Amino acid sequence: MRLTVWRFLDGNRAHEKQTAALLCGLRACGCAVDSHDIPAAALSTLLRHGLDQQLRSLPQPDFIVGAGHRSHWSVLFARRYFGGRSVVVMRPSLPLHWFDFAVIPEHDRPPPLENVILSQGALTEPLPRGRRRPGKGLILLGGPSKHFSWDTAAVRGSLQRLLAEPLEWTVSDSRRTPEETLRGLSVESGEICHWRDCPPGWLAEQLAESEQIWVTGDSVSMIFEALQSEARVGVIPLPSRRPANKVRAAVQRLVDQERLTDRVEDVAIPVGAPREPLAQEVLCARALLRRSDWLAE
């Protein structure tokens, strides 16, 4: 089947990656997707001038997709004037019932409405298959967050245990990583790649090639990106700021499902066959098609 999708972009790369992942999921379901990327307009602009008149030259949309608050009004206006079904990715700041469908991570605990499609984590784009290299390890460090404290001594202890394993390690930090975390750290077999020095596409390449990937527990989006790989995925534990922690609960569910491990010592266990990617973008796309009567049961 062929679908026309209008994708409103708010300029936030993280948001745009999630809607791109949904389009990948639609294609994986066998759809030929004609996608049209459109800059989102502010509500004040829409009220004064309406939608861009050039939209009239585009094919009528089957789905109108957006992620992030700045895209929501453009999605709703386009749905009103051009038809199609509106799809918002992530929990919107506007009422859920204003949209035909909402794809929302289950750890955000949305209400059980019939237009809500639950995803396990944020949608992420698929990675190339068949590129896993034996003996290659990747460590991705986050930093303090509203959900987790950062224990530098404990993190360094986990790093030393991981790096003691004779793999070809790549260690990368992020904007949030405290400087003292990597100060004086020796990576005898591998390298440290600071986030400022990582070129475009570097992370996807590293994820696709690694046999083991370890991520600090605060970086939930990175954990779900890692689960798109064929690697063993491990979490470096961090102390929670409060007993009720939705991010920790989401990670714990993945541990309980044996999709990842939170035991650093598991780095020494031989890695088995390539793991099947999480592929939530495919499950959510299939649910969207089924609920829209595009897909037979």
Image (tube, helix red, strand yellow):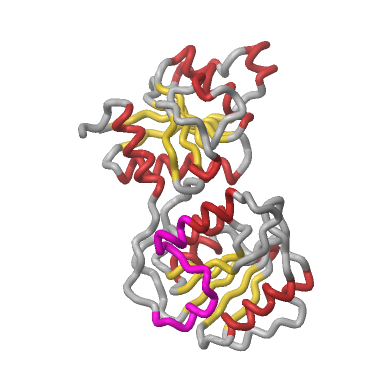
Numbered range of the magenta stretch:
253-270
x and y percentages locating residue 262 in the rendered image: 52, 68
Side of 26 where 137 appears, left or right: right
The image quarter in which residue 83 lies: top left
Q: Nearer the viewer, residue 35 or 163?
A: 163
Q: Nearer the viewer, residue 143 or 5?
A: 143
Quarter of the rendering occupied by the C terminus? top left
Side of 192 where 254 appears, left or right: left
Please tell me whether residue 254 belongs to the stretch shown in magenta: yes
Would you place residue 72 above or below residue 232 in this image? Answer: above
Farthest residue, direction front: 243
Residue drawn at 71 percent across, 82 percent down: 185
Residue drawn at 33 percent across, 42 percent down: 27
Q: Nearer the viewer, residue 263 or 219?
A: 263
The image quarter in which residue 128 lies: bottom left
Please tell me whether residue 225 belongs to the stretch shown in magenta: no
x and y percentages locating residue 110 in the rendered image: 52, 34
x and y percentages locating residue 50 in the rendered image: 60, 13
Q: Is residue 6 visible?
A: no
